[in-house]
Image (cartoon, rainbow, N blue to C red):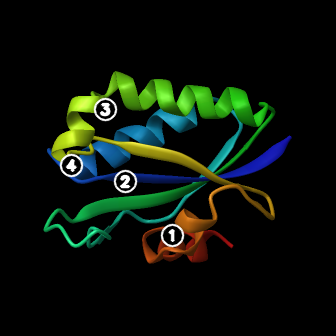
Amino acid sequence: MSRYFISIGSNCGDRRGEVTMALHWLYGLGGALSASSIYETPEIHGLDRPYMNAVAALDIDLEPMVLNKRLKEYEQSRGRDEECRHRGDVPIDIDLVAIADTILRPKDFSHEFFQIGYRQLI
């Protein structure tokens, strides 16, 4: 069983609804899920596209590569594709940032959009 810290964000459409649905989807994977509140942060690249974010801690018996593959499949199922990326639209972004004390995405881990929720969980 591993503890995964997952970053969730959306900057278009029903942003809060997309983050909420992603949390429900994570819960459906099984295991034990805890989540931060859902909160708004500015877009980090200076565009005027604020995000709704949350961080989830998922304790589950899955290999990291399997979980990551499922996260990316979920993004695609919610409409995340190359066309969206070119427009700067993020219907949902869901990334595996850390496993227990091992940081997999240092840049994401250091950003305030992740730290706000992470601090609520540790």
* Above or below: residue 2 compared with residue 45: above
Badge 1 marks a residue whose secondary structure is helix
Q: Which label belongs to residue 88?
A: 4
State which mark lies toward you, 2 or 3.
3
Q: N-terminal of the two: label 4 or label 3?
A: 3
Task: Provide the residue designation for mark 1.
Answer: 117
Task: Provide the residue designation for mark 3.
Answer: 80
Q: Position of residue 77 (x, y in %)?
A: 36, 22
Quote the CA–CA distance across marks 2 and 3: 12 Å
Q: Dot 1, crowdedness within 10 Å: few (<14), some or many (≥20)?
A: many
Badge 4 marks a residue whose secondary structure is loop
* Above or below: residue 17 compared with residue 70: below
Quote the CA–CA distance across marks 4 and 3: 10 Å
Q: N-terminal of the two: label 4 or label 2?
A: 2
Q: Dot 4, crowdedness within 10 Å: few (<14), some or many (≥20)?
A: few
Say which amino acid is labelled 3.
Arg
Q: Which image quadrant is residue 46 in?
A: bottom left
Task: Identify the residue shown where x is 43% and y is 65%.
Answer: 37
